[in-house]
Image (cartoon, rainbow, N blue to C red):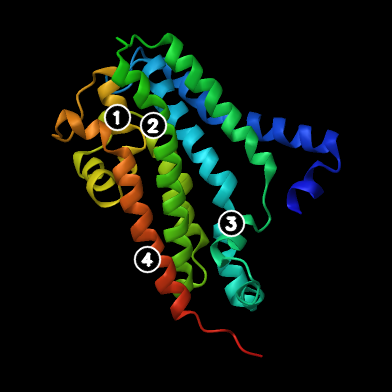
Amino acid sequence: MWIRSTVAYRTSFVLTVVGNLLLTGLDFVGILLMFSQVDSLGGWSLPEVAFLYGLSATAFGVADLTLGSMDALGGRIRDGSFDTLLVRPVPVLAQVGADHFALRRLGRITQGALVLGYGLFAADIDWTVPKALLVPVMLVSGAVIFGAVFVAGAAFQFLAQDAAEVQNAFTYGGTTLLQYPPSVFGKELVRGVTFVLPLAFVNWVPAAYVLERPYPVDLPQWAAFLPPLVALGFCALSGLAWRAGLRAYRSTGS
């Protein structure tokens, strides 16, 4: 329904997608401005940072397209409209994800993919078969990890009811964090997004292997191939949190 309403006015839809692409591209423009003054950022060159940026932006864009409406759950809980989702013969999580589905978010995915293409072409990468196979694995696993963050944030809203900005701090804030090299952040922060909230497995850890860069936290080399397992484990935990939140939900009543 949302897709049909979006594409009903094709010119408006195209302009909206292009506008979204240009708006999200301002993030990378900021990085370009920084590199106009320096040769490297935390020891990483512009193509290498573009590689990180492209992986993070593209993976997040896919998750945002499919589950980006999760932050609206708090509003439905407060006004009682969430009850209507519970009586429909469709999984509640699917309904929440599809609520106000915004096809314009394709602009973010396109922009991230363009920057990723530049990074892959311009970065000095000694390609091997494992490295080449790891790139699509990173994209898929990264999208799943970000999706799990969206679901976990939505589960938290059953408790907090007005926590959209808290959720956005970990989703939109997380993708912004991952667009920069881990070497520019403190080790405690890097440890936190590696072992507590495993966002580092979206790009930092596997990209360090692909680009042959040292990772600030000591990890074995095979950790670069863990993103699929991390994504599955994080999905399982987020699913449990969602089910717990759903069971704890109490209607606003009349």
Residue located at (34% from left, 43% from top) = 199
Residue shown at 44% from the left, 73% from the top:
245
SS at badge 1: helix
Q: CA distance from mark 4 to mark 2?
A: 25 Å
> How crowded is the residue under tag 2: few (<14 C-alpha within 10 Å), some, or many (20+)?
some
- Give the residue pinned by disc 4: 240
Q: Nearer the viewer, residue 185 or 21?
A: 21
Residue annotated with mark 1: 206
For the residues labelled 2 and 1, say whether their Cβ atoms are less than 8 Å apart.
Answer: yes
| Residue density around tag 1, few if under 14, some if 14–19, many if 20 or more, within 10 Å | many
Give the Cα distance between marks 1 and 3: 28 Å
Q: Give the quadrant of residue 155.
A: bottom left
Marks 1/4: CA distance? 27 Å
Quarter of the picture holding the N terminus: bottom right
User: Looking at the picture, how far across and down is residue 147, in whole percent?
Assistant: 46, 49
Give how far apart the Cα atoms at labels 2 and 1 are: 10 Å
Question: Which amino acid, mark 1?
Answer: Pro
Q: Is residue 114 left or right of residue 179?
A: right
* CA distance separating discs 3 and 4: 17 Å
Kindly identify which residue carries mark 3. 97
For label 2, the residue is 137
191 left or right, relative to 177: left
4 or 2: tag closer to the N-terminus: 2
